[in-house]
Amino acid sequence: DGMVPHWFSFVSPTFGTPVRLQILCGLIAMALAVILPLQQLVNFLNIGSLSSYTVTCSSVLTLRAVRPGRVAAGSIVVAGTSLISAWTWSVLFHAAQGFGPWEMALLVFLVAVVVASWLPLWRESYVMPAQDTSTGSPS
């Protein structure tokens, strides 16, 4: 589909997976595990999970949208605000060494920013994919 360079798009005939891309991701993960302290790896895992869920949800919305171009642009805004909010919260919470009224106010503000970034997507129209009645799978 042209999303990654052609060399990475090789798919294993045995497993049906992009082998070269999996090896690259494994090497990057190995390098990070060797170089970074455990607490930083845990923070990356949390932000990585948030990113993964945000991108997956945004992708489903984009695929089902009546106007996918607008939803795709909105999805980028949602992903950006989610990542910036998570990073800001992580940095400032660790710097404050606790959870007081200012930290609570910051958390409420960051959640409000992320929710506000979703508002344009909630106003769009979406359709369910057609179902193939013989197999029960999307056609």
Image (cartoon, rainbow, N blue to C red):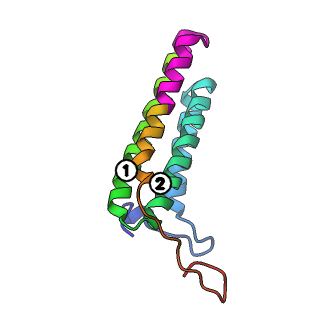
Q: Which quadrant of the structure image shows residue 116?
A: top left
Stretch of the chain drawn in magenta: 93-111
> Visible in this render: residue 90?
no
Q: Which mark is residue 56?
A: none
Q: Which quadrant of the structure image shows residue 42?
A: top right
40 w.r.t. 7: above or below: above
Few, some or many residues within 10 Å of mark 1 (<14, 14–19, 20+) = some
- Which residue lies most toward the right here? 135
Q: Position of residue 36 (x, y in %)?
A: 55, 27
Q: Position of residue 87 (x, y in %)?
A: 47, 28
Q: Which residue is mark 2?
A: 58
Per the image, is 71 magenta? no
Between residues 116 and 52, which one lies in front from this camera angle?
116
Q: Say which residue appears at 54% left-offset and 82% top-offset.
A: 139
- Which residue lies most toward the front here? 123
Between residues 84 and 29, which one lies in front from this camera angle?
84
Between residues 45 and 63, which one lies in front from this camera angle?
63
Per the image, is 99 magenta? yes
Q: Which residue is mark 1?
A: 74
Q: Is residue 79 left or right of residue 41?
A: left
